[in-house]
Image (tube, rainbow, N blue to C red):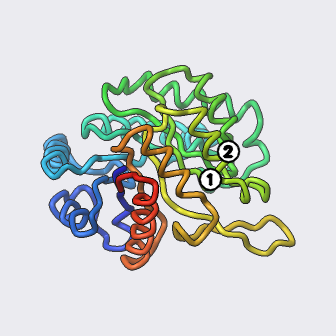
Amino acid sequence: MRLGATLHRYCGIRLNDPEAYIAECLKQGFRAAQAPDHRLGSGDDLGRIREACKKSDILIAEIGGWSNAIDPRPAERRTAIATTCEALAVADELGALCCINVAGSLNTEKSYAPHPGNFSEVAFDAVVQWVTAVLREVRPRRARLAIESSPWTPIDSPAAYARLLAAVDDPRFAVHLDPVNFILDARTYYATAAMLNDVFDQFGPRIIACHAKDIIQGDPKTVQLSETLPGQGVLDYRTFLKRAEAISPDMPLIIEHLSTEIEYRQAATHLRTIAREVAATC
């Protein structure tokens, strides 16, 4: 696997400064890159980024197209779809593996915010429509479009993701795997190995990139789950890394949502330790 991280969260360095970005990757031993958005400059700038990463053997894993493509407000929805189109086009130009977004929400505040209509057929159909529209508009040659599942959105489970893949029915649409986002209840919390095996059995090589984080129980009087560093929660990283490595030794695994360099180093150390135990590269 190729380990990477959301570098901008602790040092402010972004992919639009490829020399600094690559230097930080080499310092941390990372071999995968990501950009939280597609604003990376002109065509010449994109060429410079692409060639610098290629020369340093840094795989560009994902370009963020984060937007709410099922926003119920027509103007905002059109803008969101245009943003994802632009991000997918940039990802394709860079030779990135994918452009990533969430399915969206009928809540107008955030693309992953709760709304009672998010689990309706109307919302699911809207996701199918925007994914299909983006692929039809951009027609990517190299990069793929991928959705990250999110608990309060229409794509919240392996079953929902499988249904979406079937409905879109396009090889340019892939799976971005953040398995923590599939842990929605107490039973799955204690059965993450079974959940991971089910996901890898279902999607196999359609999984194109992964995120690394972990999850921990809160107050047990109700189901309260909180994100934490890899290794401090219950996710079975042995199963995760072993199955991901079997798909591709170049599978990117991006550590995210941490705040300091120390936290990212701690997470990376844990992942590399587990990788050695299961004979995976990291």
Q: Which amino acid lies under the numbered mark 1 shown in the image of this protein?
A: Asn
Q: Looking at the image, is 154 positioned above or below residue 274?
A: above
Q: Decide: marks 2, 1 in contact (CB < 8 A)? A: yes
What kind of element bears circle 1? helix
**Res. 23 image quadrant:** bottom left
**Res. 162 image quadrant:** top right
Q: Which mark is residue 181?
A: 1
Name the outermost residue toward the right: 221
Lower sequence index among marks 2 and 1: 2
Tell me the residue that label 2 is attached to.
Answer: 156
What kind of element bears circle 2? loop
Q: Looking at the image, is 28 positioned above or below residue 154?
A: below
Question: Going 53% across and 56% down the picture, which residue do you hit?
Answer: 238
Query: In this orientation, does residue 239 appear?
Result: yes
Counting from the top left corner in percent of width and height, residue 230 is at 52, 66
202 vs 115, left or right, is left
Query: In this orientation, does residue 73 appear?
Result: no
User: How many numbered marks, from 0 up?
Assistant: 2
Counting from the top left corner in percent of width and height, residue 239 is at 55, 51
Q: Looking at the image, is 254 positioned above or below residue 70?
A: below
- Judging depth in this view, the residue of 96 and 117 nearest the camera is 96
